[in-house]
Amino acid sequence: MKKGRPFWSVSLDRRTQM
């Protein structure tokens, strides 16, 4: 996990990239 980025934030980022 990256700092300053919640686990749910990463999921949203992945969906946006798709």
Image (tube, grey):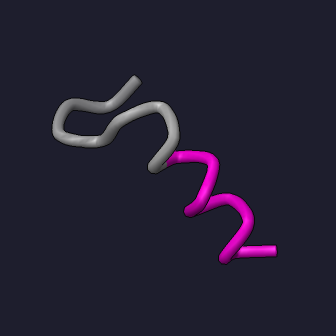
Left or right: residue 15 versus residue 13 is: right
Task: State the image coordinates of residue 11 (x, y, percent, origin top left).
Answer: 63, 48
Is 3 colored magenta in this rendering?
Answer: no
- 8 relative to 17, above or below: above
Q: Residue furthest front?
A: 8
- 15 relative to 10, above or below: below
Left or right: residue 11 versus residue 3 is: right
Q: Residue furthest top?
A: 1
Provide the residue span drawn in magenta. 10-18
Q: Main secondary structure of the magenta part?
A: helix
- 17 relative to 7, above or below: below
Residue sitting at x 59%, y 59%: 12
Q: Nearer the viewer, residue 2 or 6?
A: 6
Q: How many marks?
A: 0
Q: Residue furthest left?
A: 4
- 16 relative to 1, above or below: below
Residue sitting at x 17%, y 40%: 4
In terms of image quadrants, where is residue 5? top left
Is 12 colored magenta in this rendering?
Answer: yes
Task: State the image coordinates of residue 10 (x, y, percent, origin top left).
Answer: 52, 46
Task: State the image coordinates of residue 9 (x, y, percent, origin top left).
Answer: 45, 49
Q: Residue furthest right?
A: 18
Residue sitting at x 56%, y 62%: 13
Q: Quadrant of the C terminus?
A: bottom right
Q: Quadrant of the N terminus?
A: top left
